Amino acid sequence: MNKEWKDNSGKIHSGSYHGSKNEYDVIDCSLCGFKHVVPIPSEEFLENYYRKDFVKNRPAGFYNKIEKDIPWWEIIYNEKYDLLEKYITKQNKSILDIGSGLGYFLKYGKARGWKTVGVEPSLESCDYSMKHGLEIINEYLDQKNYQKLGKYDVVHMHEVIEHLPDPVNMINLGMRMLNPGGLLCIVSPNDFNPLQEAFMKSGKTDQWWISPPEHINYFNFSSISKLLKENGFNILEQTSTFPLELFLLMGDNYIGNNKIGKEIHSKRKQFEMTMYKTGNDEIRRKLYKNISDLGLGRELIIIGQAKI
């Protein structure tokens, strides 16, 4: 079944239907080259939502949980900086984090000698991260303000582009904010992946990963790589995060169950921290790279280099 929708500019978004939630339909859009919801929420609606309403959905104990996970996040974030430093080798390195959240990614970059700047529309998150002595700009990045931020060796977007009404525009802004040969690093949920589809087809749940208006776009490794290539980037690195859906297929149904969710999160952390502490972290990194080649992993991680 195909669906189509006309945006305010008159462009027709059409493609095969892949599910619905909250009065939004997901289509594999032939115009955009990736799955997204229709209708697409307006930028005005989303800016207001993320400035004021988004943090209201944070569960009780959110900050305590994040702070408890800091030793684990240190391993994850330092792995990403290791990848970036394979290509950015000069002494004075700079990074802009779009959607910098609570600032921990920038905090570890700063400790490694990077010049770090974050852009974060949530006032609460901005205030929290500035307590770490970070430079954070409390704005919603767009065509009006990007130029004043300058240029960087890396532009980083962690779980950002799935929320945007026009992800291509943000990728293009990222390109304009890069120094020659700079890197764009994107992390996004790897949705509609084979493990999710397998568990859904077992009849135990619906498409729980569809979550508009928060998640508008749904990428996989193929569609995000194609999007970056079409917008001036060469793909340098591809990897994934732990394929959490394996727990579902082994009987640990964490969907809508916070208790089980915490348990499987702890197991995932235990695996990754044990591999690190025992000197086997390189094996884990190779494992996740190979998993990404199969289209698996809870999140996709892509690093592209701006074509010179």
Image (cartoon, rainbow, N blue to C red):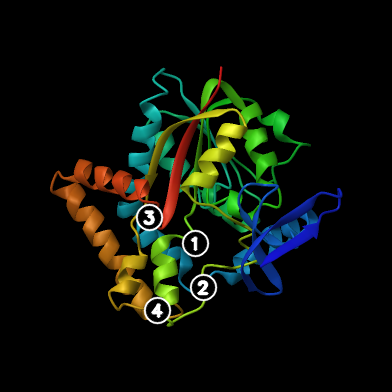
Q: Which of the two marks, 4 or 2, is nearer to us in this view?
A: 4
Q: Quadrant of residue 151?
A: top right
**Horizontal side, residue 6 vs residue 33: left or right:** right
Residue 213 visible (yes or no) = no
Query: Residue 202, labelled with which disc?
Result: 4
Residue 133 position, x and y percent, is 50, 41
Cα separation between marks 3 and 2: 17 Å
Mark nearer the N terminus (4 vs 1): 1
Q: Is residue 240 above or below residue 86?
A: below
Would you name the residue on which mark 1 appears? 192
Q: Residue 11 or 123: which is nearer the viewer? A: 11
Residue 148 visible (yes or no) = yes
Would you name the residue on which mark 3 appears? 296
Q: Which of the two marks, 3 or 2, is nearer to us in this view?
A: 3
Mark nearer the N terminus (4 vs 2): 4
**Residue type indicated by callout 1:** Phe
**Horizontal side, residue 236 vs residue 131: left or right:** left
Q: Which type of secondary structure does the marked residue at label 2 adopt?
A: loop
**Residue type indicated by callout 3:** Leu
